[in-house]
Image: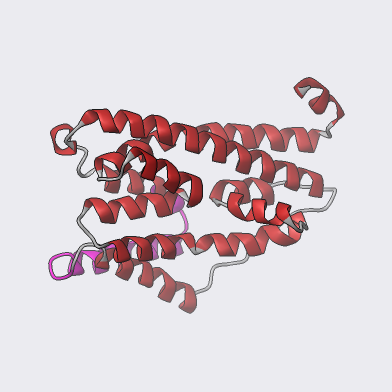
């Protein structure tokens, strides 16, 4: 069946599907880290699995458990996660006209609109490849992320006290690793630097979670003052 698909599909579509599959494997495997860290931060295995299934936004999930692990309030954890997840609305504005979906397919696409599926989709040259890349990446990441989240949660549950393994600071390190590759642009570096300064200033004097919210507010302010350049989308048939 797979061979028949690749035999009939155009080279652009086949390449998009292969790219989406490779991205899905790399991203899905990282779910092990989230599952383990969420459990040692205090969530149950069921709560951890539900979080990946329903929220399905890696950065937002790591931010949430980071606040929880630091002793922050549920309100601060949800607010921090929501602020970071708001970027998916911008992704939706980009991919929606490219996919041209309606009904239940539109709802499904909304759940699968993440960093990876958007990046693969907008990097394609033809409308068919855009759609193939989006769905291959989105579905692949969703399935593997949830599977490996459960694997990591079961492993983390068996570890016991996170401090005995040095995992009490691992959530922050994991989130930093997730963000680090995105700091190539100068605007991103400026946002990160200002956010660090604001967070360090607030950590000694505010409850856990508040410095993260303030750091997110820095990004909003910078975005309003210096809006990012709009991406160049290629959806025509040629180069």
- In the displayed structure, 137 sits above or below 165; it is below
Magenta: main secondary structure: helix
From the viewer's perspective, is residue 62 above or below residue 15? below
- Residue 202 falls within the magenta-colored stretch: yes
Q: Where is residue 166 in the image (x, y as percent from the top left)?
A: 17, 36
Q: In which quarter of the image is residue 98?
A: bottom right
Q: Is residue 122 left or right of residue 203?
A: right
**Bounds of the magenta span?**
180-206
Q: Residue at x 65, y 51 (%)?
A: 108
Q: Does the magenta stretch include residue 118?
A: no
Going 28% across and 48% down the picture, which residue do you hit? 172
| Residue at the front extreme of this rendering | 46
Between 29 and 51, the one lying in front of the other is 51
* Residue visible at 37% across and 32% down in the picture: 152
Residue 117 placed where, x, y %? 61, 47
Looking at the image, residue 15 lies above or below residue 91: above
- Residue 220 percent coordinates (x, y): 43, 72
């Amino acid at each position: 069946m797979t061979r028949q698909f690749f035999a009939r599909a155009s080279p652009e579509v086949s390449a998009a599907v292969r790219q989406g599959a490779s991205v899905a494997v790399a991203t899905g495997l990282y779910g092990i880290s989230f599952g383990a860290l969420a459990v040692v931060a205090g969530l149950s295995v069921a709560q951890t699995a539900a979080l990946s299934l329903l929220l399905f936004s890696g950065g937002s999930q790591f931010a949430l458990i980071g606040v929880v692990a630091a002793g922050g309030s549920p309100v601060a954890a949800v607010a921090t996660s929501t602020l970071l997840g708001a970027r998916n609305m911008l992704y939706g504005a980009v991919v929606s006209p490219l996919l041209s979906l309606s009904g239940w397919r539109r709802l499904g696409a909304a759940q699968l609109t993440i960093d990876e599926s958007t990046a693969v989709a907008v990097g394609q040259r033809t409308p068919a490849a855009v759609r193939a890349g989006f769905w291959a990446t989105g579905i692949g990441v969703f399935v593997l992320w949830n599977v490996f989240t459960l694997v990591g949660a079961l492993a983390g549950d068996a570890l016991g006290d996170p401090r005995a393994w040095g995992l009490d600071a691992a959530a922050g390190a994991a989130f930093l690793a997730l963000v680090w590759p995105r700091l190539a642009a100068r605007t991103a570096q400026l946002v990160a630097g200002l956010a660090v300064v604001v967070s360090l200033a607030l950590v000694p004097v505010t409850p856990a979670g508040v410095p993260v919210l303030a750091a997110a507010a820095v990004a909003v302010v910078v975005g309003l003052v210096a809006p990012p350049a709009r991406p160049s989308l290629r959806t025509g048939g040629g180069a």
